[in-house]
Image: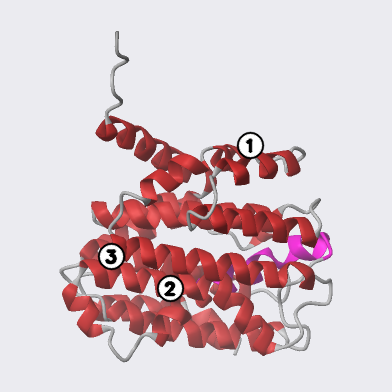
């Protein structure tokens, strides 16, 4: 008697259900924003986020040596690029992370095969964009594994490079995916591609500044050692201005894409403004947005993305504490 053949559609549904569930466990923010995208974009952007989260988990593992992180990153990249069986990454990675305390992220690594199966159902153009993003991020983070110091990165140039490999490249990825699925956006973005890098870097700078007390407590700083908080906030504000310009290039009929970007952007604006309003803070919870604020802004975005003027008005008003600090 023959065993019943597996149903590829049912298997994909199981994998996609896992992707949606684990996304909610490893990122509250992206679990809120990614479902705003049209289904095909939601699938590939959610998938990419999980792949990047695996890279971040290796990066965040404080007990691992830079050499071990580099080895695991290389194994992961080879698995993504189909150069080796994925289990040859999963098994040694879980072994090295046996003392790691985030069970959701360990579960994600265990399910790397499912995440890659979803990737292989995306269009060839989307797969190429994802592979490029993960390659640059993985290799870039490997470069910075040995540069974690208490004093911070060497200078602004090194800081910009770090923000590019961990987030600016994600802005480029999003632009590729949006262009693959929206012919009008593909036309609008021509000649303005650099804005997508600024969009990713603005979000990353927000995270670096927000997380700086916790990083300092574990003997690490991702800020440039020769720059003040005020100088960094000024650069972040400039990148937010570019981010606003980027969002305005998204056609109004692509409402889900606009909301996805504007929601992430607005949360960054409000967080940076809270940081700017304080001379110092000792824990990220002091500048964390309340759930009430997040959900109120989430509702606001549904209306705001239909009006360029309303989005610009929000940015002007919400960034007032940030501008005053410059």
Q: Which residue is mark 3?
A: 257
Residue 122, relative to residue 161: is it above or below? above
- Res. 47 mark: none
Residue 218 inside the magenta-drawn segment: yes
- Measure how far apart labels 2 and 1 are at the Cα level: 28 Å
| Place of residue 88 in the rendered image (x, y in percent of width and height, measured from the top left) | 61, 44
Residue under the point 17% across and 74% down: 183
Q: Residue furthest top?
A: 1
Tag 3, which secondary structure? helix
- Measure how far apart labels 1 and 3 are at the Cα level: 31 Å
- Res. 171 mark: 2
Badge 2 vs badge 1, beta-carbon distance below 8 Å: no
Residue under the point 61% across and 83% down: 160
From the viewer's perspective, tell me whether residue 195 is left or right of residue 105: left
Which circle, 1 or 3, is nearer the viewer?
1
Earlier in the chain: of badge 2 and badge 3, it is: 2
Residue under the point 29% across and 13% down: 2
| Place of residue 41 in the rendered image (x, y in percent of width and height, measured from the top left) | 29, 58
The boundaries of the magenta stretch are 203-219
Tag 2, which secondary structure? helix
Quarter of the image holding residue 211? Answer: bottom right
Q: Which residue is mark 1?
A: 103
Residue 136, relative to residue 98: is it above or below? below
Q: Nearer the viewer, residue 190 or 118?
A: 118
Q: Specify whether residue 285 is in view.
A: no
Earlier in the chain: of badge 2 and badge 1, it is: 1
């Amino acid at each position: 008697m023959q065993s019943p053949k597996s149903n590829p559609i049912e298997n994909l549904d199981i994998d996609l259900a896992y992707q949606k569930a684990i996304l909610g466990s490893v990122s509250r923010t992206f679990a809120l924003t990614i479902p705003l995208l049209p289904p095909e974009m939601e699938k590939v952007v959610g998938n990419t986020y999980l792949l990047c989260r695996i890279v971040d988990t290796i990066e965040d593992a404080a007990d691992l040596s830079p050499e071990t992180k580099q080895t695991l990153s290389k194994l992961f990249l080879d698995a993504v690029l189909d150069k080796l069986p994925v289990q040859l990454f999963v098994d040694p990675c879980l072994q090295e992370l046996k003392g790691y305390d985030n069970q959701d992220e360990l579960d994600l690594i265990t399910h790397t095969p499912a995440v890659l199966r979803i990737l292989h159902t995306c269009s060839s153009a989307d797969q190429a964009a994802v592979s490029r993003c993960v390659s640059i991020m993985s290799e870039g983070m490997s470069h910075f594994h040995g540069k974690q110091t208490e004093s911070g990165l060497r200078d602004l140039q090194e800081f910009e490079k770090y923000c590019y490999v961990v987030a600016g490249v994600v802005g480029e990825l999003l632009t590729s995916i949006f262009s693959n699925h929206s012919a009008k956006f593909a036309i609008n973005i021509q000649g303005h591609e650099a804005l997508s890098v600024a969009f990713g870097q603005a979000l990353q700078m927000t995270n670096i500044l927000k997380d700086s007390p916790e990083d300092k407590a574990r003997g690490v700083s991702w800020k440039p050692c020769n720059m003040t908080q005020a100088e960094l906030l000024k650069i972040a504000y400039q990148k937010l201005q570019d981010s606003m310009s980027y969002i305005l290039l998204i056609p109004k009929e692509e409402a889900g894409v606009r909301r996805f970007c504007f929601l992430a952007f607005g949360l960054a604006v409000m967080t940076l403004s809270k940081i700017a309003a304080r001379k110092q803070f000792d824990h990220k919870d002091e500048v964390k947005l309340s759930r009430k604020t997040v959900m109120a802004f989430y509702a606001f975005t549904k209306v705001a993305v239909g009006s360029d003027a309303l989005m610009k008005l929000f940015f002007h008003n919400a960034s007032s504490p940030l501008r005053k600090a410059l």
